[in-house]
Image (spheres, rainbow, N blue to C red):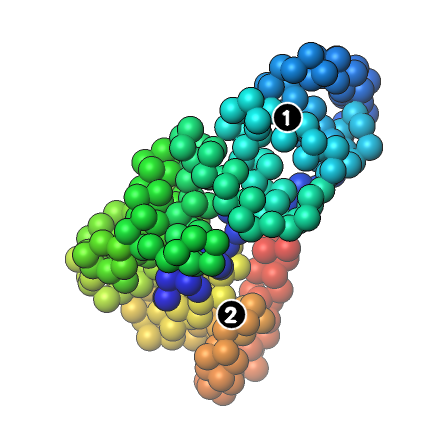
Amino acid sequence: MEVMEALHRRKSIRAFSPRPVPRELVHRILEAARWYRRAAEQGLAEVQVKLGHLYALGQGVPQDEAEAAKWFQKAAQQGDRAAQFNLGALYDQGRGLPKDPAQAFAWYRKAAEQGHPIAQAQVGKAYTEGQVVAQDFAAAVQWFRKAADQGEPTAQFNLAILYDSGRGVPQDHAQAARWYRLAADRGYALAQLNLGNLYETGQGVAKDTAAAARWYARAAAQGNADAEYALGICHADGEGVPQDTVEAYKWTVLAAEHGNAHAEVFKEVLAKKLTPEQLARAQQLIEAARHKLSGR
């Protein structure tokens, strides 16, 4: 997988959205909002950040991203790293403020220099893209490593990608496998997929088709189309798992539904190998898998 594609497959910054609040907490949140405003107006940065979060999420106050940005700005100017990161995110997304990648990067950089792991990952991402700053894979490696060492899974994955492709560092599949595994152990589907690929090909790890199938299965359980297709191939060929055309068809159909173009073709090939009874069983399994994925 190319570096640019990999870095864009998953956003590390979540958009703010209102969250439902249990009825018994409403009064306490309203009271907290009043106290937060009083303290925030006195210039307490930590409280300004909390008040910004309440406005961003619409808890205890009407949701107002511009007001959230105002309070984050006040705290960020006092050097609060969480506020700097949040302000960068709002500039990044154009929420509450005009979208401004340069301002987003500037605030991410300030937070990153204070050790904020997701901000460090965002700075690394900026260096791989080369839009706000000159493209510099060596700098990207440095920032991803800072965040990865703090356990940030997006950074661990992106650092693995750079080792895998030899950009910014000498190509090293063993190091790629190490960082993929750390992210994969934290549930990062793309890392699980890529670690499965390394086990399947024997790059950076001893070749182990059973381990490959297990990692594909973990990513497939999260609805990753490429992992679903890879797992379907494993079942079709009996590589790492018992040969099972029904299971192969199930995963291939799901992969096709989730956008894998190769699966669109392969599912028709597999369908011709199934008896009517097997096809009916496969459809039951597909429906069960769809239901499970919809409840994630």
Sooner in the amino-acid sequence: mark 1 or mark 2: 1
Q: Nearer the viewer, residue 2 or 139?
A: 139
Which three-letter amino acid code belongs to the residue tagged 2?
Ala
Residue occupying image coordinates x 26% and y 55% = 168
- SS at circle 1: helix
* Most foreground residue, 6 or 140: 140
**Which secondary structure lies at badge 2?**
helix
Residue at image coords 50%, 41%: 106
Q: From this viewpoint, is residue 23 visible? A: yes
Q: Amino acid at mark 1?
A: Lys
**How far across and how far down the image is residue 67, in percent?**
75, 33
Q: How many marks?
A: 2
Left or right of 291 in this view: 167: left
Q: Is residue 267 visible?
A: no
Q: Quadrant of residue 84?
A: top right
As drawn, the label of residue 281 is none
Q: Is residue 100 above or below residue 109?
A: below
Please give the name of the residue rendered at 65% of the width and 15% of the height, measured from the top-left corner.
43
How many neighbours does mark 2 have within 10 angstroms: few (below 14), some (14-19), or many (20 or more)?
many
The image quarter in which residue 214 lies: bottom left
Assign the N terminus to one quadrant of the image.
Answer: bottom left
* Residue 199 location (% of width, % of height): 25, 60
Residue 294 locus on image (x, y percent): 64, 55
241 with respect to 119 (left or right) = left
Which residue was labeled with disc 2?
255
Q: In terms of image quadrants, where is residue 277?
A: bottom right
Q: Residue at x 47, y 58 (%)?
A: 131
Q: CA distance from mark 1 to mark 2?
A: 47 Å
Pointers 1 and 2 in contact (CB under 8 A)? no
Disc 1: which residue: 74
In this view, the mark in front (1 or 2): 1
